[in-house]
Image (cartoon, rainbow, N blue to C red):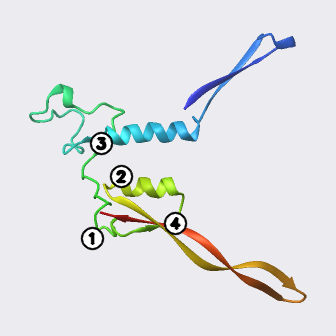
C-alpha cells in the first residue's frame, strides 16, 4: 500500500491537502512478492506458540514478522513428477512469445530448439445470408520451441 496525496486550492496553491492509501502498481507488488519468495525461510517450528523459545535456533536466524516462511520445499517443476502433476520441461512444446519460451527452457537448464512449421488455418471467412459461414484454407507459419538437452 502507498500513500497518495492531492493539493486543493485556488491557482495551484496547496491550501487544503487530502491523502489516502491505495494499492501499489501491479508490477511493484509482483516484484515485492518475487523478492520475498526468493528470500523465504524454512521453518519447522511454524506452529510453536510465540512465547516458546526455539530449541537451538540462533537469534539472527529467527524469522521476522514480514519474512515469508515455508514448511515444505516446493517441487521442482522442471522435472517430471506425476505425483504433483508436473510433466517436466524436457520435450515440452511452447508456441508463445519466443523470448518467453526460451526463458522457460533455460530456467530449467535446457536448450530451446526452434522449428518453423506450416499449419492449415481457416481464413477470409464470410457470412453467407442466412446462417452459414464460409472460409478459405490458408497456410500459416508457426514457430514451435521445444526444450531439449
Under circle 4, the secondary element is loop
Which of disc 4 and disc 2 is earlier in sequence?
4
Q: Is residue 71 rendered to the left or right of residue 9?
A: left
Furthest toward the left, the residue is 56
| Marks 3 and 1, how far apart at CA | 24 Å
Under circle 3, the secondary element is strand
Q: Which residue is mark 2?
A: 107
The disc placed on residue 15 is: none
Q: Residue at x 23, y 39 (%)?
A: 49
Q: Which residue is mark 3?
A: 69
Q: Is residue 88 above or below residue 31?
A: below
| Label 2, residues with CA under 10 Å away: few <14, some 14-19, many ≥20 | few
Q: Where is residue 83 shown, x and y percent of the image?
A: 27, 70
Which of disc 1 and disc 2 is earlier in sequence?
1
| Marks 2 and 1, how far apart at CA | 22 Å
Q: Where is residue 92 shown, x and y percent of the image?
A: 39, 68
Q: Which residue is mark 4?
A: 95
Q: Is residue 93 above or below residue 126?
A: above
Q: Which residue is mark 1?
A: 83
Q: Residue at x 24, y 45 (%)?
A: 47
Q: Where is residue 123 shown, x and y percent of the image?
A: 73, 77
| Tag nearer the camera, 3 or 1 | 1
Amino acid at each position: 500500500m502507498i500513500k497518495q496525496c492531492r493539493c486543493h486550492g485556488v491557482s495551484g496553491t496547496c491550501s487544503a491537502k487530502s491523502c489516502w492509501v491505495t494499492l501499489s502498481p501491479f508490477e511493484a507488488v509482483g516484484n515485492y512478492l518475487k523478492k520475498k519468495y526468493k528470500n523465504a525461510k524454512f521453518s519447522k517450528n511454524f506452529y510453536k506458540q510465540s512465547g516458546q523459545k526455539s530449541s537451538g535456533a540462533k537469534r539472527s536466524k529467527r524469522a521476522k514478522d514480514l519474512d515469508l516462511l515455508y514448511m515444505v520445499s516446493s517441487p521442482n517443476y522442471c522435472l517430471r513428477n506425476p505425483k504433483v502433476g508436473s510433466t517436466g520441461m524436457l520435450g515440452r512444446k511452447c508456441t508463445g512469445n519466443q523470448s518467453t519460451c526460451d526463458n522457460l527452457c533455460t530456467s530449467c537448464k535446457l536448450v530451446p530448439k526452434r522449428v518453423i512449421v506450416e499449419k492449415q488455418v481457416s481464413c477470409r471467412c464470410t457470412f453467407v445470408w442466412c446462417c452459414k459461414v464460409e472460409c478459405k484454407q490458408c497456410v500459416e507459419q508457426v514457430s514451435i520451441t521445444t526444450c531439449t538437452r
